[in-house]
Image (cartoon, rainbow, N blue to C red):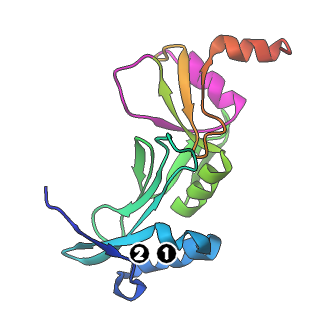
Amino acid sequence: MDQRKQASLDESKLLPHSRAFLAEFLQWKPEWKHYCSMEETPQGWLLVVNIPSPVVDSECEIVVFFANGDDDISLGLGSWHCHGDVSFHVSELEFREVTVLEAIKLMVKGDLVGISSIPTDNPFWSLMYYNRWNLENELTDEYSTGTIMIHSWDGTKDRKVTISDLESLNRGH
């Protein structure tokens, strides 16, 4: 695999889609400019954003990169990633698709979290909109182990959850 040259951010060198995303990102969080850098590809310079979790030991770094050229934006949270817009269920009847920037905002708020089954040999996470319906759906899925680990960017929602945890919530405990 080829090693891409990394460099400090120089907005004037970025390709158009990278530059456009950077402008939107910095309009939202100008104080996070120091999380931005760039990498050189045969097409030119592409934006890379690495937003570390505020939790020291967290695996929940948010990463934005352009995978196959300047128009293929990708987003990662821990071991989960996608290319293009982000899709998720909010409820049984509501499915949402949001831009990468909107997804980052939801991750920072704690509304989008990574989940993994416990125990499992699969190191990869899924992405979940954090609410009771999705927790119950994940825990009762036919392939579920009955225990999931929630991974939130800021660590506030990190915990193991079982179906009995949800049942105790129903009983008011």
- Circle 1 crowding by C-alpha within 10 Å: few under 14, some 14–19, many from 20: many
- Circle 2 crowding by C-alpha within 10 Å: few under 14, some 14–19, many from 20: many
For the C terminus, the image quarter is: top right
Which residue position holds label 2?
Answer: 18
Magenta residues? 119-142
Q: Residue furthest front?
A: 56
Q: Residue at x 65, y 35 (%)?
A: 157
Tell me if residue 161 comes above or below residue 47 in the rendering.
above
Which residue position holds label 1?
Answer: 22
Disc 2 is placed on an element classified as: helix
Task: Please state which amino acid type lies under the numbered disc 2.
Answer: Ser
Position of residue 10 measured from the top left corner of the image (x, y, whole percent)? 38, 83
Quadrant position of residue 38? bottom left
For the N terminus, the image quarter is: bottom left
Position of residue 8 measured from the top left corner of the image (x, y, whole percent)? 36, 76
Q: Residue at x 61, y 24 (%)?
A: 137
Task: Please state which amino acid type lies under the numbered disc 1.
Answer: Leu
Disc 1 is placed on an element classified as: helix
Position of residue 144 measured from the top left corner of the image (x, y, whole percent)? 49, 17
Q: Can residue 146 be seen in the rendering of this structure?
A: yes
Q: CA distance from mark 1 to mark 2?
A: 6 Å
Position of residue 90 measured from the top left corner of the image (x, y, whole percent)? 66, 40
Q: Residue at x 52, y 44 (%)?
A: 56
Tell me if residue 95 comes above or below residue 136 in the rendering.
below
Quadrant position of residue 79? top left
